[in-house]
Amino acid sequence: MSENTIKLIHCADLHLDARMTSQLPREKARERRAELLHTFDRMLDWAQEHRVDAILIAGDLFDTKNISAAAKNTVREGILAHPDIQFFYLRGNHDADGFLGSLEELPGNLKLFEAQQWLTYLLAQGRVAVTGAELCGETKERLFSSLALDGDRFNIVLLHGQEADSAPREGAEVIPLRLLKNRGIDYLALGHIHAYKSAPLDARGVYCYPGCLEGRGFDECGLHGFVYLEIDPEQKTCRKEFVPFARRQICRLEVDVTGCASGAQIAALVRERLEKEGLSPESLVKICLVGQVDISCEKNLDFLEKKLEPEFYCVRLSDETTLQVDYGRFALDASLKGEFVRLVEQAQDLSAGEKAEVIRCGIRALSGEEPM
């Protein structure tokens, strides 16, 4: 890289002000909303420390049109506090006018894009171009086909939508990659997918989703952060690096409990897996029980979840096991349980899984326990 290297951050899908109450208790959801704002602030500090020239925000900076004063002020003050950094903000499908409408005056270092129309900004004395257009659900092929770039520049194209090989559907924010190939794009900066993804676009360029800056729930497990770019405008080359940056790790662990006969045995396997992973107490952890267990196996997930709660920021358990019925065990059983199992076994309108679940509930009821 030359001394004229341009440094950028590519981020997307920050979803500031997301409610998160469907995934977390109310108090922790409120705490996580504050953490999302803090992570945005930390990213700006990181950018300042590493002398970043520009930050590309590829959509969904906010989660809803009704933005809190705290979120508006955090973003506005963050932009104003870093006048040497250019902010390129392209709105996504979750963004509305709530933030921009609240600004009495647009900061000079905040660059915006237009709906259904390409707009280009130049960096590095015109040797790097940032071109983008906001997709509004009715994007036609002609928008993508009309993209015209100067091949002598390093070209960044900024978009928010779902990448696809085909043309966009009516009413959907779809980015047809085939219409963007061989148009002089060096780096296609995308937003919308919440996990990091990068692949070649054509012989010249690549496309990249940085993923969300912070995972918000157990449907967004894995590492989250932003992409750091170092561009040599003279050589028209780029070095990119994914930077994990989330405040907390969110992970999903599968624990095979096949053959377990009791909740104590299940708890031991879960504990063994957690010790092996060595997760931070700051983590959000979802434990999924898988495998095949006998219908008589007691699984008190609520008890186990409560037992693990003090060890992590948030713990959730889910039962994805299948039930196994040893019908031979009940074939000659003269008790009410045996008669019940044989009756269910003969049912023609139930699947094997449904039979197992009916038998499990029935046996618990016959034993004086509450069906779970």
Image (cartoon, rainbow, N blue to C red):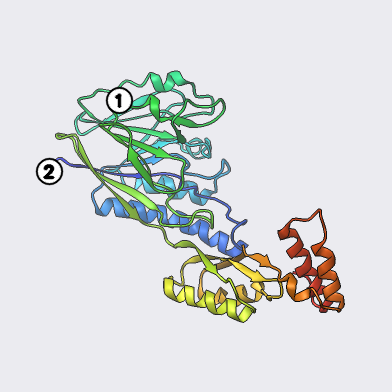
Q: Residue at x 41, y 28 (%)?
A: 133
Vertical side of 101 occupied by 352: above or below: below
Query: Mark 1 — residue?
Result: 182
State which quadrant residue 258 falls in.
Answer: bottom right
* Residue 101: x %, y % from top left: 50, 35
* Residue 100: x %, y % from top left: 47, 36
Vertical side of 26 occupied by 131: above or below: above
The amino acid type found where label 2 is placed reads Glu
Between residue 37 and residue 360, name the one nearer to us: 360
* Residue 308: x %, y % from top left: 56, 75
Label 1 or label 2, whichever lies nearer to me, is: 1
Vertical side of 138 occupied by 226: above or below: below
* Residue 239: x %, y % from top left: 23, 44
Between residue 103 and residue 135, name the one nearer to us: 135
Between residue 151 and residue 107, name the one nearer to us: 151
Q: Is mark 2 on a helix, strand or loop?
A: loop
Q: What element carries label 1?
A: loop
Query: Mark 2 — residue?
Result: 3
Q: How crowded is mark 1: few (under 14 residues within 10 Å), some or many (20 or more)?
A: few
The Cα–Cα distance between marks 1 and 2, rounded to whole angstroms, is 29 Å
